[in-house]
Image (spheres, rainbow, N blue to C red):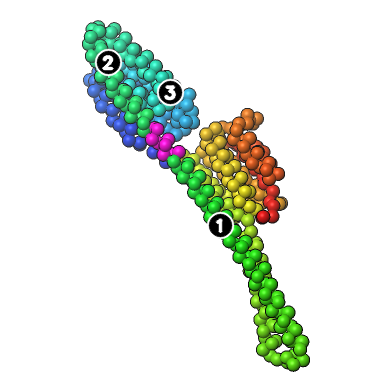
C-alpha cells in the first residue's frame, strides 16, 4: 500500500504541468533574488526567498495525493490561496516585477479546484493586490495597466489549459468506469449463456439419452431372462455396457448440476480494476456463485454502487470486495478504509441496494471497519435456479 501511495504521489508531482511550474519557479526565483544581497545578509531579500520557498512548498502540498483537491478540498484550496498571498509578500519584499508571474501557477490550480466564478474572484483580488503594491512603488496608472493586462492574459491561458486538462482526465476516468461496467455486464451475459447451455445439456442427457438407455436396459433384461438367450454372452455384455453407460450419463448430469447457477467471479473481477491511488481486492471469488441471472445482477449492481460510494463519499484508498457462502445465502461485503462513520444518512444509493435485496428476501447492513472505514454487507438467499 505504501508503494502504491508513493507511486501515485510521484506521478502527480512529476506530471507535465507540475514540471512546467517547477521550471517557472526556478527561473523567476533566480532572476528575482540577487545572490549578492543574500551574501550580504539582506534581511528583506532573505525573507523574500523564504516567501518563495513557502510558495513552492504549498504548491507541492495540494499536488501530493494525501491532500489532493478531491480528498481534502478545503485544505487544498487554502494552500493555493496561500501561494498567491506568498507571491504578493515576495513581490513586496524583493521588488522584482517578475515575481508576479508566479500567479500563473496559482491560476492554473484554482480553476481545477473551484467553480469558475470563485476562481475568478480570487484571481481578481490577487491582481488588485499586485496593482496596489506597484502603485505604492510609484508606478503610473497607465504603466500599471500595460503591465497587468498581459499578466492577466497569461493567467487566463494557464487557467483554461489546466481546466481543460482536468476535464479531460475526468472524462477519461468516466470512460474507464463505463468500460468496467460494460465488461462486468458482458461477463455476466457470457456466464448466463454458459449456465443455460449447461442446464439444457444436462436436461437433454437426463431426459432423452437417459430415458432411451433405461428402455434399452429393460429390453435387454427381458431378452436375458428368455431361456433361449439366458446363456448368451453378447446379451450379458450388452446389458453390462448399458448399465455402465447409464451410470456414466448420470455422473455427467450430476457434474453439470453441481455448476448450476451463475458464476459472478469474472464480472466482479472486471469491477475490481486498478484505480489511480486506490487498491481494490476481490476475495472469495470461488464462492461467487448465485442461483440465477437476477440474483447475479442484483449483487453486481450492489458491488458497483458500494465501490462508487467508497470512492466518492468515503474517499478510500483500499477497498475489499469479499464474497462468502453463509448457510443458504451468499454474502457480499464492500469494505473500505475511508472517512465514513456511523450513523449514516442514507441516500438513494443505499436505498436502491435495500430495494434490490428486498426482491429476493435479502438484507443489507452497514458496519464499522477497524481501524476506520465502513463495510456494506449484502446477503441474498440462494434459491433453486428456474
- Residue at figure coordinates x 57%, y 55% from the top left: 192
Determine whether label 3 and label 2 are within 8 Å by CB.
Answer: no
Mark 2 vs mark 1: which is more N-terminal?
2
Q: Nearer the viewer, mark 3 or mark 2?
A: 3
Q: Which residue is mark 1?
A: 193
81 up-or-down from 271: above or below:
above
- In the structure shown, which secondary structural element does the residue marked by tag 1 occupy? helix
Residue 125, percent from left and from top: 37, 14
Image coordinates for residue 157, horizontal then vertical, percent: 30, 25
Q: Judge depth for marks 1 and 3 and give the one in front.
A: 1
Residue visible at 54% across and 38% down in the picture: 308
Q: Mark 3 and mark 1 in contact (Cβ < 8 Å)?
A: no
Q: CA distance from mark 3 to mark 2?
A: 23 Å
Where is residue 134? Give x, y as percent: 28, 11
**10 Å neighbourhood of mark 1: few (<14), some, or many (≥20)?**
some
Q: Which residue is mark 2?
A: 148
Tag 3 residue = 115
Q: Which residues, given as a range, are shown in magenta? A: 166-174
Mark 2 against mark 1, which lies toward the viewer?
Answer: 1
Mark 3 vs 2, N-terminal side: 3
Horizontal placement of 4 versus 15: left or right? right
Mark 3 crowdedness (10 Å alpha carbons): few <14, some 14-19, many ≥20: few
Q: Nearer the viewer, residue 231 or 159?
A: 231
> For this view, does 119 lie left or right of residue 96?
right
In the rendered image, which quarter contains the C terminus? bottom right
Quarter-of-image position of residue 54:
top left
Amino acid at each position: 500500500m505504501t508503494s502504491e501511495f508513493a507511486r501515485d504521489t510521484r506521478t502527480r508531482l512529476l506530471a507535465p504541468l507540475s514540471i512546467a511550474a517547477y521550471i517557472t519557479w526556478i527561473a523567476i526565483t533566480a532572476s528575482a533574488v540577487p545572490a549578492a544581497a543574500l551574501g550580504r545578509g539582506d534581511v528583506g531579500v532573505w525573507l523574500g526567498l523564504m516567501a518563495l520557498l513557502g510558495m513552492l512548498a504549498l504548491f507541492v502540498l495540494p499536488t501530493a495525493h494525501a491532500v489532493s483537491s478531491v480528498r481534502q478540498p478545503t485544505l487544498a484550496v487554502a494552500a493555493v490561496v496561500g501561494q498567491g498571498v506568498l507571491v504578493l509578500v515576495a513581490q513586496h519584499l524583493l521588488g522584482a516585477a517578475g515575481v508576479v508571474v508566479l500567479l500563473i501557477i496559482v491560476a492554473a490550480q484554482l480553476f481545477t479546484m473551484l467553480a469558475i466564478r470563485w476562481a475568478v474572484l480570487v484571481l481578481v483580488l490577487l491582481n488588485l493586490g499586485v496593482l496596489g503594491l506597484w502603485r505604492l512603488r510609484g508606478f503610473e496608472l497607465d504603466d500599471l495597466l500595460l503591465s497587468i493586462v498581459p499578466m492577466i492574459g497569461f493567467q487566463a491561458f494557464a487557467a483554461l489549459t489546466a481546466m481543460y486538462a482536468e476535464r479531460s482526465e475526468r472524462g477519461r476516468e468516466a470512460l474507464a468506469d463505463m468500460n468496467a461496467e460494460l465488461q462486468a455486464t458482458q461477463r455476466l451475459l457470457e456466464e448466463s449463456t454458459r449456465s443455460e447451455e449447461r442446464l439444457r445439456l444436462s436436461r437433454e442427457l437426463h431426459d432423452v439419452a437417459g430415458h432411451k438407455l433405461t428402455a434399452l436396459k429393460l429390453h435387454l433384461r427381458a431378452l436375458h431372462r428368455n431361456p433361449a438367450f439366458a446363456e448368451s454372452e453378447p446379451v450379458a455384455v450388452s446389458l453390462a455396457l448399458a448399465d455402465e453407460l447409464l451410470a456414466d450419463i448420470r455422473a455427467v448430469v450430476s457434474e453439470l448440476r453441481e455448476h448450476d447457477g451463475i458464476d459472478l467471479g469474472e464480472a466482479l473481477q472486471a469491477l475490481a480494476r486498478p484505480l489511480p491511488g486506490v487498491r481494490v481486492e476481490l476475495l472469495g471469488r470461488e464462492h461467487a456463485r448465485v442461483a440465477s441471472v437476477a440474483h447475479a445482477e442484483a449483487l453486481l449492481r450492489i458491488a458497483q454502487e458500494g465501490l462508487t460510494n467508497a470512492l466518492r463519499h468515503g474517499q478510500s484508498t483500499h477497498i475489499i470486495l469479499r464474497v462468502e457462502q453463509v448457510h443458504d445465502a451468499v454474502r457480499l461485503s464492500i469494505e473500505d478504509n475511508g472517512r465514513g462513520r456511523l450513523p449514516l444518512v442514507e441516500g438513494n444509493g443505499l436505498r436502491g441496494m435495500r430495494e434490490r435485496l428486498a426482491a429476493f428476501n435479502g438484507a443489507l447492513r452497514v458496519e464499522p471497519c477497524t481501524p476506520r472505514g465502513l463495510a456494506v454487507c449484502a446477503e441474498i438467499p440462494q434459491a433453486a435456479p428456474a
